[in-house]
Image (tube, helix red, strand yellow):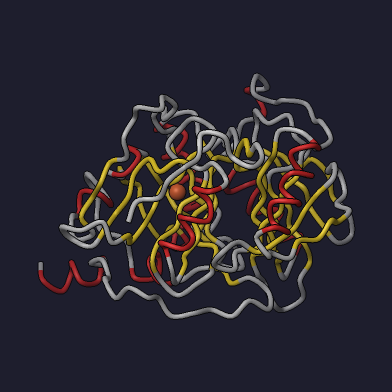
C-alpha cells in the first residue's frame, strides 16, 4: 500500500546528513575512507575520526568510532531545519509514544536520538560546526573524489511500517519495488531534499544498515575509485558494480570497508520536487529495476549488512527474494 505524505509535516526534515560507524581499528578505517574512497579527514581524536565529502561545509558526514571487536552501525543522521524543528520532533515523537533522548554530540548543535518504527537508530540535529568546502581544491582530489553524502539504505523486516513512519514525517515516495502485479511493498525510495532518495528501505532481515552513499563528479571518478581500490588491495571488496540502476538512474559502485560496512559511490540522481510527480513502480522480479546493464548483485550484497547495537534483527514479513549473481551464473 502506498504511503500518504502530509503537505505540512510535524517538523522540517531537510536531508540525509551523517552516519556514525563503530569500527575495530580507527587508523585502518580512516585510511580506507581517505585513500580508497577519497573523503577529507576533518578531525581525529583518540576515539573518533570525522570525515566529510569535498564539497561539504558541515564538519562531518561520516564519523568512525572505536568500537572494540564489535563493529556496528551506530547512528543514521538527518538534519532538521532549525532548533525549533528539533523541539517539534521531540514533541511529535513523545505524542507517538516513541522514546527519544537529547544528547550532547561533539561538533553538532542540539541532537535528538530515537529508534524509528522498525528499530533503525536515528539521530537528528539542526546544525554542525562549519568546515571549508574543498570542491575547488582539485589538486587534493583522490580516489572517487566524493562530493557529498546523499542517502542511506536500511534493510527492514517490515517495509510497509518503515515507509509509513517516514512518510508521516514528510518523506515522499519517488520509486518503489513491489511483489509482482501488486502494491505490496518490497522496497521504497523516499526523498525529502529534492532528488529521488534520502532514505531507502528494502525487505530482509533487519533493521540493518545496508549502505550509505556519496555522490561522485562523473563516471571517470567512479572508475578511478575502482582502480584505486584495486591498487590498494581492496579490489575484492567491491561487492557490486559498476553498473546502472534502473531505480533512480544511478551509475553505481559499492565497496566494503575493513569492517564490512558498505559504502556506495554513484553519479547523482534526477530531481524529485514537484508535487504532481508520481512514484515509479517496479516489479520485484524485473531485473531492470536493479540494473539497466551490468551483472546482478552478489549474494553478499543482498544479504550482508551492518547491525545496530543491542537491536534485535527480525526475519522479513515478505518472502520475495530477488535473483542474485550466483543464481544468474547457475543458469547461464
Ligand atoms: Fe544507494
Quarter that holds the N terminus? bottom left
Q: Residue at x 38, y 40 (%)?
A: 174
| Image-based side of 112 in relation to 252, left or right | right
Q: Position of residue 245 (x, y in %)?
A: 31, 45
Q: Quadrant of residue 186?
A: bottom left
Residue 217 versus residue 235: which sits nearer the camera? 217
| Image-based side of 236 in relation to 329, left or right | right
The image shows residue 139, relative to residue 152, as above or below, that is above
Residue 163 versus residue 34: which sits nearer the camera? 163
Q: Position of residue 178 (x, y in %)?
A: 26, 58
Residue 268 versus residue 184: which sits nearer the camera? 184
Q: Position of residue 77 (x, y in %)?
A: 67, 50
Q: How many marks?
A: 0
Q: Position of residue 322 (x, y in %)?
A: 26, 66
Q: Residue at x 84, y 35 (%)?
A: 129
The image shows residue 156, relative to residue 282, as above or below, that is below
Q: Residue at x 68, y 74 (%)?
A: 309
Q: Residue at x 71, y 53 (%)?
A: 123
Quarter that holds the C terminus? bottom left
**Which residue reaches farthest front?**
95
Q: Quadrant of residue 150?
A: top right
**Which residue reaches farthest left?**
332
Residue 276 versus residue 78: which sits nearer the camera? 276
**Which residue reaches farthest top?**
136
The image shows residue 78, relative to residue 309, as above or below, that is above
Amino acid at each position: 500500500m502506498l504511503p500518504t505524505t502530509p503537505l505540512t509535516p510535524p517538523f522540517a526534515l531537510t536531508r540525509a546528513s551523517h552516519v556514525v560507524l563503530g569500527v575495530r581499528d580507527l587508523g585502518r578505517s580512516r585510511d580506507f575512507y581517505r585513500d580508497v574512497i577519497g573523503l577529507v579527514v576533518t578531525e581525529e581524536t583518540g576515539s573518533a575520526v570525522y570525515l566529510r565529502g569535498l564539497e561539504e561545509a558541515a564538519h562531518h558526514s561520516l564519523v568512525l568510532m572505536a568500537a572494540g571487536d564489535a563493529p556496528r552501525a551506530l547512528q543514521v543522521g538527518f538534519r532538521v531545519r532549525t532548533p525549533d524543528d528539533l523541539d517539534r520532533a521531540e514533541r511529535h515523537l513523545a505524542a507517538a509514544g516513541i522514546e527519544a533522548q537529547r544528547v550532547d554530540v561533539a561538533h553538532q548543535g542540539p541532537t535528538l536520538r530515537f529508534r524509528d518504527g522498525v528499530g533503525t537508530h536515528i539521530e537528528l540535529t539542526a546544525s554542525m560546526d562549519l568546515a571549508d568546502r574543498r570542491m575547488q581544491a582539485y589538486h587534493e582530489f583522490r580516489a572517487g573524489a566524493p562530493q557529498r553524502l546523499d542517502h542511506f539504505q536500511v534493510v527492514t523486516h517490515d517495509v510497509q511500517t518503515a515507509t509509513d513512519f517516514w512518510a508521516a514525517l514528510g518523506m515522499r515516495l519517488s520509486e518503489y519495488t513491489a511483489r509482482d502485479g501488486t502494491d505490496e511493498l518490497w522496497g521504497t525510495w523516499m526523498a525529502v531534499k529534492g532528488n529521488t532518495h534520502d532514505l531507502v528501505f528494502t525487505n530482509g532481515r533487519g533493521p540493518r544498515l545496508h549502505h550509505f552513499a556519496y555522490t561522485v563528479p562523473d563516471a571517470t571518478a567512479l572508475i578511478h575509485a575502482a582502480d584505486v581500490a584495486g591498487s590498494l588491495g581492496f579490489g575484492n571488496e567491491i561487492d557490486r558494480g559498476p553498473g546502472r540502476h534502473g531505480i533512480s538512474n544511478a551509475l553505481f559502485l559499492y565497496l566494503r570497508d575493513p569492517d564490512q560496512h558498505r559504502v556506495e559511490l554513484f553519479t547523482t540522481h534526477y530531481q524529485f520536487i514537484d508535487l504532481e510527480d508520481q512514484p515509479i513502480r517496479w516489479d520485484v522480479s524485473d531485473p531492470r529495476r536493479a540494473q539497466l546493464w551490468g551483472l546482478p548483485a552478489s549474494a553478499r550484497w543482498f544479504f550482508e549488512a551492518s547491525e545496530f547495537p543491542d537491536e534485535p534483527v527480525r526475519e522479513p514479513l515478505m518472502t520475495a527474494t530477488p535473483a542474485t549473481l550466483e543464481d544468474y551464473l547457475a543458469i547461464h
